Amino acid sequence: MKRIAVFGYSSLSFEAMNRLKSDKYALIFIAKDEQEAALVEDKGFHARVIDFKNDDDLRAIGIGTDIDIIFCFYPEDSDNVFLTISARALDKNVSIIAIVDDPESAPKLLAAGANKIIDPYEICGRKTHEMLIRPDISTILDNTVFGRHDLKMAQIEIPPDSILENVKTSDLNLKEKHNLILIAVVDKALGDQLHFVIGGNHHELNAGDVLVVMGPSSEIKQFKNEVEGVRSH
C-alpha cells in the first residue's frame, strides 16, 4: 500500500484525495492548525498538525521512513519549494508532486527535487486549445456529460504483441470507432512524462506506452479489450 502525505488545503487537495481514497493508498493530510485538521477529518480523511518547516516534524509523519509520495499543494510556490527541498534532503527516493502558481517557479521546484510539476493554467490552456481545434470534443461532451452522464477518463497500457503496436496515434480514429478522445500518451521510451495529443500528432505506439483517453465508460472498456488483444503471427 502506497503511503501519501498531502500538504496544502485546497480544492485540488480534496480532489486528489477523493480519487485516491481506496485500499491501494494510505492518505494523511498535513494541516497547519487544529481548525484545518478538523475540517479535513470531517470529510473523512486522517489529518496531522505539524510545522512543515521543521525537519523533526516531517520525520514524525514518516518522511524518510514510510511515506512514498508527497503532494505539495500549498498556494505559495515558495512554501512548495521549501517543502520539496526539506523532503528531498530527508528521503532521496520519495516521489514529490508539486503544484505551481507561477510558471517561472517550475525550474526551482525541479531543481529542489520535485519529480513532477502540475501547472493548472497550462492544463486548462491545453484543454481550451484542444476544444477549439478539435470540435469532436464538443460532440463527446454532448453525448456524455449532457447525455448519459458517464464521462470517464482512463489510462490504458499497451501490452506486448498488442494489435496497436507500431500503430500511429493519428491512425487510431477513436472518435469514429469508439466515441473516445485521446487526451495524452506516456511514451515509456522517453520516460514517464505525459505528452498531450494536440493537432496532427503522429506518435508511433509501442508496448509499455500508456494512452490517456476520455469518453463513456462502456466505450473505454471495449477499447481496453481491443488494446489487450494480441495480434496474430
Image (cartoon, grey):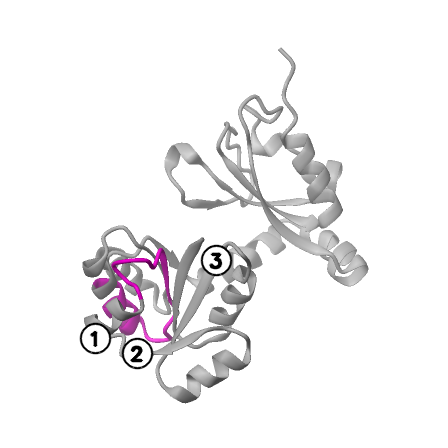
Residue, far bottom? 35
Q: Depth check: give the residue in front, 228 or 127.
A: 228
Q: Earlier in the sequence, mark 3 or mark 2?
A: 3
Residue at 53% x, 37% y is: 201
Report the magenta residues as a range: 62-85
Q: Position of residue 142 (x, y in %)?
A: 76, 58
Residue at 34% x, 68% y is: 102
Residue at 55% x, 29% y is: 159
Q: Could you tell me the amino acid type at mark 3?
A: Tyr
Q: Which residue is mark 1?
A: 54
Q: Depth check: give the residue in front, 64 or 32.
A: 64
| Magenta stretch: includes residue 93 | no
Secondary element under disc 2, as helix, strand or loop, is: loop
Q: Position of residue 160 (x, y in %)?
A: 53, 24
Q: Could you tell me the amino acid type at mark 2?
A: Ile
Residue, far top? 233
**Quarter of image, res 227:** top right
Q: Could you tell whether 34 is left or right of 223 in the image?
A: left
Check contact, mark 2 vs mark 1: CB within 8 A: yes
Q: Could you tell whether 85 is left or right of 31 in the image?
A: left
Q: Which residue is mark 2?
A: 50
Q: Could you tell me the amino acid type at mark 1?
A: Asn
Q: Label 3 crowding class (10 Å Cα cut-off): few <14, some 14-19, many 20+?
A: some
Instruction: In the rendered structure, find residue 25 and report the number of the disc placed on it.
Output: 3
Exactly how many numbered labels are in the figure? 3
Q: Earlier in the sequence, mark 1 or mark 3?
A: 3
